[in-house]
Image (tube, rainbow, N blue to C red):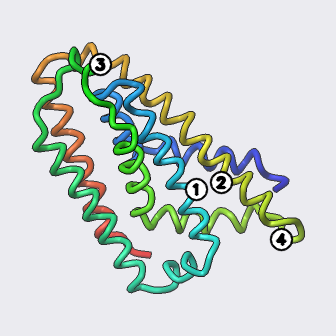
Amino acid sequence: MQHYPLYLLMAAATVLSPGPGVLMTLTNSLRFGLRGTLGGILGTACGSFIVAGVSATSLGLLLAASALAFTVMKWIGAAYLFYLGIKLLRAPAFRFDEIQTQPRGFARRFGEGMAVQLTNPKSIFFFLSIFPQFIDTQGAYAPQFLLLVGSFSALIILIHTVYALTAQRARRWLASERGGKLLNKAGGMTFLLFGALLANSNK
């Protein structure tokens, strides 16, 4: 815990790196506006909190040690990413001038963000490998756990909000129907790529 600033740097680098959660935030921001992105961001943060809790239990150790458990979790995550990719590829080009009139669906976006985190076994292994290096075994575990996980979730909210604001600034360049179709295809193919990488990953 004396190296908490280093933990923050490592966590920030992890959150900043492109992944399914970042892609979902960018897509939601462009399709539904900044307010329509909040549900997905909070869902992603909450999912990380749950994954961290799971990693601290025997289930986390099971997923780390069992090839079968890892494979099952891996294919669930890959299947969900494939579903998101195909859904986005088949979606019609969105119109930016209609964003404010579309239903934001907070609960739905929240669930999607949480599902992306919960179905990614790499998140569990991240917490399994990072936590032991920053927790003082001589001190109380719960306060340290809450601090580290809370910091990680807060970084998700902060950094993903910045991503969403950046995407909002790019709307003017993607206002045409062609731009909307291009974004759908790029996002869909990226989700499919993440799914393929996850399906081929090893422990």
The tag earlier along the polypeptide, 4 or 3, is: 3
Identify the image quadrant of residue 136: bottom right
Which label is found at residue 149?
Answer: 2
Q: Are marks 1 and 4 in contact (CB under 8 Å)?
A: no
- Kind of residue at badge 1: Phe
- Kind of residue at badge 3: Gln
Q: Nearer the viewer, mark 4 or mark 2?
A: 2
Which label is found at residue 195?
Answer: none
Mark 1–mark 3 Cα distance, whole angstroms, equals: 31 Å
Residue bearing the label numbered 3: 100
Mark 3–mark 2 Cα distance, whole angstroms, equals: 34 Å
Mark 4–mark 2 Cα distance, whole angstroms, equals: 17 Å
- Kind of residue at badge 4: Thr
Which label is found at residue 137?
Answer: 4
Q: Residues within 10 Å of mark 3 (few under 14, many from 20)?
A: some
The tag earlier along the polypeptide, 3 or 2, is: 3
